[in-house]
Image (cartoon, rainbow, N blue to C red):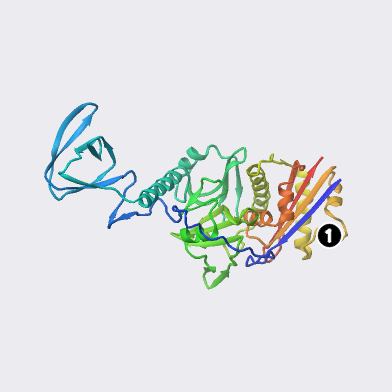
């Protein structure tokens, strides 16, 4: 019988008990760093457009004509001194777009941008393509459904909105919170997700270029709730969005997922921990399950099967810790998780437990567990086949306690 334990503690301002790692610097050769779909690439004071390969200056009046196969039709005369963008060329001809060409001769001066400028335009096009394939706050649910498919699950959140979960066998994992059918919250670990130029795989230094400096806290009314940004989690505010970046310290401290919340939704969340209820408790439990499976599939493993018995065992332990103000795998009766699981009728050959306490929600709890080696090993254990998660909120303070019970029959 294999038994594995793990726990993580986070205080109310998200200070963690993990040792920091040195942040990686931006690779100077990465020419795409900081370039988004909205970045303007300048060439001698004029914007270089996507698809543009050069420019021309008309030195003497010259003909503009349209080519349709071998057919050449006069369009108009371009006057000396006029300037045009060039998007393509044929032998002896230059295209100004739309199928219109001029002769490349002494009547025009043709120039090309540097390789660096052309590469930067390519980066902008890449960012535009990524954005068109991803989703963002303000998108209507119908548009998101068209991109992500039929929702798999709907669960309550501490924000008073529901998370609608999308995935294809836990690939392309998204959770979206809607208000009046419009996206107001997004969480995603999908490699194609982009927010304000920040994307999966970026280093903290690259994220800073895209999003600016992390914020020190969130002000609500007369209270400022402080945030401890470190090499695992950083929160930014940009263009009306609170953007939290979760880094994977076991994979080079690169960004692995994002939570994005609109300013209005964040400001309407009561206090630090938001709305707590039975539905939110159940929501956190199922979200932990889905987040765990998304991480497993991302790492080439099979998803786990949900266990109601394991949830019962886990929830009872979370409730006991919250009610009696302790945080340990062994309860006050001296029972370890394996005894507690057996008492619920679970028979196992392998079993393990993860604990967390104090995180805002299941997303923060899961990401913290993934950055703690023992907990990560439980989440990515190849021998485990089942999981039940149990959550309980401490009366008065609403601090969440999280328990995950893993096992294999």
How crowded is the residue under tag 1: few (<14 C-alpha within 10 Å), some, or many (20+)? some
Give the residue pinned by disc 1.
331
Can the viewer see residue 307 in this picture? Answer: no
Image mark count: 1
Q: Position of residue 191 (x, y in %)?
A: 54, 46
Q: Residue at coordinates 28% horizontally, 46% vertically from top-left?
A: 54
Can the viewer see residue 206 in this picture? Answer: yes
Instruction: Using the image, determine if residue 393 lies above or below residue 86.
Output: below
Relative horizontal placement of residue 192, taking residue 409 as reference (left or right): left
Q: Residue at coordinates 65% horizontally, 67% vertically from top-left?
A: 15
Relative horizontal placement of residue 409, taking residue 106 as reference (left or right): right
Q: Residue at coordinates 65% horizontally, 42% vertically from top-left?
A: 297
Instruction: Using the image, determine if residue 206 lies above or below residue 75.
Output: below
Q: Position of residue 251 (x, y in %)?
A: 63, 53
Quarter of the image for the N terminus: give it: top right
Relative horizontal placement of residue 329, taking residue 140 as reference (left or right): right
Quarter of the image for the C terminus: give it: top right
Q: Quadrant of residue 399?
A: bottom right
Between residue 256 and residue 195, name the one nearer to us.
Answer: 256
| Direction front: furthest residue | 106
Relative horizontal placement of residue 331, taking residue 356 as reference (left or right): right
Q: Quadrant of residue 407?
A: top right
Q: Position of residue 398 (x, y in %)?
A: 67, 63
Q: Position of residue 408 (x, y in %)?
A: 80, 41
Between residue 293 and residue 146, name the one nearer to us.
Answer: 293
Mark 1 lies on a secondary structure that is: loop
| Direction bottom: furthest residue | 222
């Amino acid at each position: 019988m294999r038994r594995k334990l793990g726990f993580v503690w986070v205080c109310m301002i998200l200070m963690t008990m993990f040792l920091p790692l040195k942040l990686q610097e931006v690779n100077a050769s990465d020419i795409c760093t900081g370039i988004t779909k909205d970045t303007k690439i300048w060439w001698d004071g004029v914007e270089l457009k996507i698809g543009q390969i050069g420019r021309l200056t008309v030195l003497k009046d010259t003909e503009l004509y349209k080519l349709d196969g071998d057919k050449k039709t006069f369009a108009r005369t371009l006057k000396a001194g006029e300037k045009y963008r060039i998007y393509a060329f044929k032998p002896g001809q230059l295209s100004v777009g739309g199928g219109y060409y001029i002769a490349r001769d002494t009547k025009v001066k043709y120039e090309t941008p540097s390789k660096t400028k052309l590469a930067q335009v390519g980066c902008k096009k890449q960012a535009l393509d990524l954005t068109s394939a991803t989703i963002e706050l303000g998108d209507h649910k119908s548009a998101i459904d068209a991109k992500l498919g039929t929702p798999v699950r709907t669960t309550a959140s501490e924000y008073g909105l529901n998370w609608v979960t999308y995935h294809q066998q836990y690939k392309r994992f998204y959770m979206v919170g809607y208000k009046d059918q419009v996206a107001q919250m997004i969480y995603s670990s999908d490699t194609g997700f982009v927010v304000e130029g920040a994307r999966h795989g970026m280093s903290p230094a690259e994220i800073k270029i895209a999003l600016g400096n992390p914020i020190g806290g969130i002000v609500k009314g007369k209270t400022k709730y402080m945030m401890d940004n470190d090499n695992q989690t950083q929160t930014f505010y940009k263009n009306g969005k609170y953007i939290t970046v979760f880094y994977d310290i076991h994979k080079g401290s690169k960004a692995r997922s994002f939570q994005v919340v609109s300013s209005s939704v964040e400001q309407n969340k009561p206090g630090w921990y938001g709305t707590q209820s039975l539905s939110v408790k159940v929501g956190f439990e199922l979200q932990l399950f889905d987040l765990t499976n998304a991480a497993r599939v991302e790492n080439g493993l099979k998803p786990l099967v949900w266990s109601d018995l394991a949830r019962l065992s886990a929830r009872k332990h979370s409730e006991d810790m919250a009610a009696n103000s302790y945080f340990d795998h062994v309860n006050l009766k001296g029972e370890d998780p394996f005894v507690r699981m057996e008492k619920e009728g679970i028979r196992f050959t392998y079993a393990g437990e993860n604990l967390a306490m104090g995180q805002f929600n299941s997303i923060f709890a899961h990401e913290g567990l993934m950055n703690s080696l023992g907990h990560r090993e439980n989440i990515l254990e190849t021998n485990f086949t089942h999981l039940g998660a149990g959550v309980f909120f401490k009366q008065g303070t609403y601090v969440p306690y999280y328990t995950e019970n893993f096992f294999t029959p």
